[in-house]
Image (tube, coloured by chain):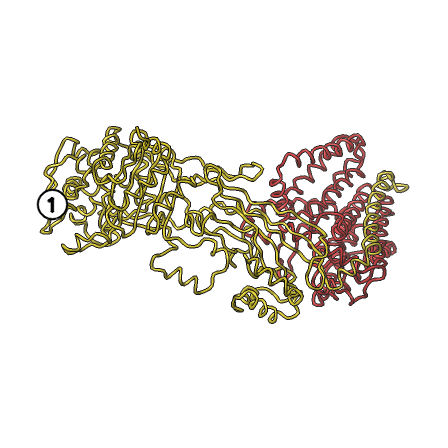
Chain colours: A yellow, B red
Amino acid sequence: MIRSRPAPVAPRLRLRLLATGLGLAFLAVAGQLANLQILSGERMAALSDRNRLRLRPIVAPRGILFDRAGLPLVDNRPAFTLVVVPRDVPDLDALVGRLAELLAVPVSELKERLARVSSDSPWPIRLSRGLTLDEVARIEEWRLDLPGVTVEVEPQRAYPGVRFAAHLLGYVREASDQDLGRNGMRRGDLVGQTGLERLHDGHLRGRDGGEQVEVDAYGRMIRILDRQEPVPGAHMWTTIDRRIQQAAEDALGARAGAIVVMDPRNGDVLALTSHPAYPVERFSRPLDRETWLALVQDPTRPLLNRAVQGIYPPGSLFKIVVAAAALQSQVITPFDRLSCPRQWVFGGRPYHNWEDHDRGALTLHEALQFSCNTYFYQLGLKLGPEKIVQMAGAFGLGRVTESGLTGERSGLVPSPAWKRETLKDKWHPGDTVSLSIGQGLITVTPLQVARMMAAVANGGTLWKPRLVDRVATADGRLLHEEAPEIQGRVEMAPVIFEFLREALGAVVAEGTGKQARVPGVTVGGKTGTAQTHEFRSDADRKRRDQDHAWFAGFAPLDEPQVVVVVFAERAGLGGQVAAPIAREVLKAVFLEKVARADLPR
Amino acid sequence: MLRVDRRLLVQFDWQLFGLAGCLIVAGLVTVSTLVPRLGARQLIALGIATVAAMVVLAVDYRTLARWACWGYGLGLVTLLGVLLVGRAAMGARRWIAVGPVSLQPSELFKLAFIGTLAVYLASRESSRPGWDRLIVPLALTLPAVALIVKQPDLGTALTLLPVAAALILVGGARWRHLGMLAGCGLAVLPVFWFLLRDYQRERILVFIDPSRDPLGSAWNVIQAKITIGSGQLAGKGLFGGTQSRLAFLPERHTDFVFAAFAESWGFLGAMGLLVVYVLLVLRGFEVAATARDTLGSLLATGATVLLATQALVNLGMVTGLLPVVGIPLPFVSYGGSALLTAVGAVALIANVRMRRFA
């Protein structure tokens, strides 16, 4: 096909339109070039001279942790941070030496902070956090001898007390080298490492903003060229009740141990404490070798969160499980009786009750009330290990609670199958005897006990311990919400739960748990005294101050609203040591009822 | 050896290749002063590009356009395959290794895309313009754009859209339809955008462009501005660019190469470069206006608009007029695949011009 002339193939008008549009765009670029190179050329040249531009990060304040009533558990306060821009420092070694002198810190500590960055880096490095006013004054005084050094004000965690709820709240620490780059973390960012701070850390952290600033030769700001506001971290509303938490901490006092307070109606954790604790705030700064070693090697183990990481034999608390299993499998009825002698011999070995006299034949109700060991040895043997293990599993023992707290342990409910597989050993009837009073290889965490007692109190529902209610931004945008979650159900006749609650009420009313009585409130509970070593002499048996003291209870008896679990490490008898601590916590929980009951009639 | 009609050689477009040559030389010099070892590598790429240009010139553009349709289909399948199976090779999705040479397929895909759209629109030239002139090109464009965005390569995706728009315009769609298209586009975009919440918008932006960083990219732009501005009227000379040499300028030999050039040569040099681009684009449109048939006209238009928008988006980004999107400056930035595409586009335009009387 041959055409006589080039066909009017494309409408010229349209091509011209296109060309004009593109031409205008090129004109815009030309205009911007004139603007940059001619109009602001001199200023830009000055800026480029020694490159006087700095990027100054503006730290996003970390979200606040609130208790269930909206009271802050952890807040922020402004703090002074010492910042250095290596590029602006002519002689880094000299500077580090001078700073070490001014701040009275070892040179090595400051050197360590600068070790991982280039000495020509234009990025600010945080040398030290939380300077005192005194230190700031000294720095300012020597300002002219400290080129490249500035003191910035940044938000820092403010804790209600040095060790208040340390294990529950957890600590924040500067991102480690492994953290960098993950989730956009930068050197010097603070990251929640344990406890509540670690849960939803990404939301709590927010996003840093920054400023582009022009500085003089000393690194002092001349003007701000551009600013990007930080996005503050979202707040977290927890299920904790700060008042009860405080009461629990006070009640435990200087004793090593843990307390868990839980709402049996939904699994809300109202308080969780572990003692001894560590100074939380100290952890946000780099630890030196000595402090670290001191904490790690401390025989009282202050870094261990005993409420979830500590595993201990439950002792007589476990009799609740054995009683439940016996009633459910109809090995015994509430009307049957078994003997409660001072001493009971099995397999040629004498097993003792904790009391020195014979109580005669007891009902199950009475056996729980007086926590008779010799009764439960016999009951356990009648029942057999399988049924006990099964019931313990139903109550959530031997299984983590999935609370989300760091390093939670599962504890152990030994079974014949487990012993065969793991220890390559036969299950002896003696194992059953030990197990039936919560001794031997069985271990639990205080939080597991709380979950179990909540199930006893609420008629069999195994709630996941709930610590976080919601995470939301300051302007109310919901980022995360947690509903109460059922983890399981203890399938048992309601009359058995009723029987257990009644018997546990009797424990506190007139049994071993008398010291947990609270005026104006009916309390149910069980004491436990767990032996910490297996073989003891007869004299040793009388000295029980090395035993773990337990009390696990709930109140009010008829309509339980709260479960309290007290664990006191190597503190003595549960009824004498743990029960009074629980009483103090319960008094705080039922403040008004207690006050009303105390009024003279 | 390919049989080349001697009459064609007479028609070889010295002006077009001269302009492209100026840009290439400017790029080579700038890149070499910044990172000497990369200058040599860019020379090798130039050699390959020259051979490719000769092949493109030797084959009639009507044949090339038919090949392009196959290339387009193959490209789509590749993109889809990469999307479906490419999860493991996350970081390396944009690249395909061919022996020692690694190639960015989405670069060459741009030319195949132009060819395909041009072939379709040219095939409809004798029929009455209807919705088909709009719908079919859009149907050819949008899936490809979506797949490339997913790659993720926002830069390439963004250059395909103006090219498609230009081809639809020149391809003879009715004004009424064009108006509707523009209206719909303008209406839908902001509605969609404002329906999103802040953090979702942010997420999308971060997803599309992972390098998006409130401090990082803003820092790049202000440094680029200072670099350009500090060149002032006459520039600091070839080796006087402190900003770019001291590595304050990020990606100084690739996407931000223009800043280094403008620092060395000043406003005069930068304007000179700009003028070369404008002359090149005008020449492209001239070829489009005088082509023998609609296909040729459309091919020349597409190639010209491709080069122009790439240059404009890059220059706009480097001078701080547009947000930061990773697009190289055609002919000048370091990078073999981009150079190959740019030279290919010029060769395509020249091919159309050579055969305007044949």
Residue at 31 percent of width and 31 percent of height: A520
Q: Chain of mark 1?
A: A
Residue depicted at 40% across the width and 59% down the height? A295
Amino acid type assigned to the residue bearing label 1 in the image: Arg
Q: Residue furthest front?
A: A600
Q: Note whether A574 is above or below A136 in the view shown.
A: above
Q: Position of residue A165 (x, y in %)?
A: 42, 47
B313 left or right of A521 in image: right
Looking at the image, is A406 positioned above or below residue A98? above
Give the camera-side residue of A291 and A338: A291
Q: Quadrant of residue A459?
A: top left
User: In the rendered image, is residue B1 in sight?
Assistant: no
Q: Secondary structure at mark 1?
A: loop
Q: Quadrant of residue A512?
A: top left
Q: Is residue B197 left or right of residue A25?
A: left
The extreme right residue here reads A4
Q: Nearer the viewer, residue A544 or B101?
A: A544
- Residue B86 image offset from top left, x and y in percent: 56, 49
Residue marked by disc 1: A342
Locate residue B340 relative to residue A400 in the image: left or right. right
Residue A105 appears in the figure: yes
x and y percentages locating residue B354 in the rendered image: 84, 51
Q: Position of residue A69 (x, y in %)?
A: 46, 36
For this rendering, which residue is in front, A358 or A482? Answer: A358
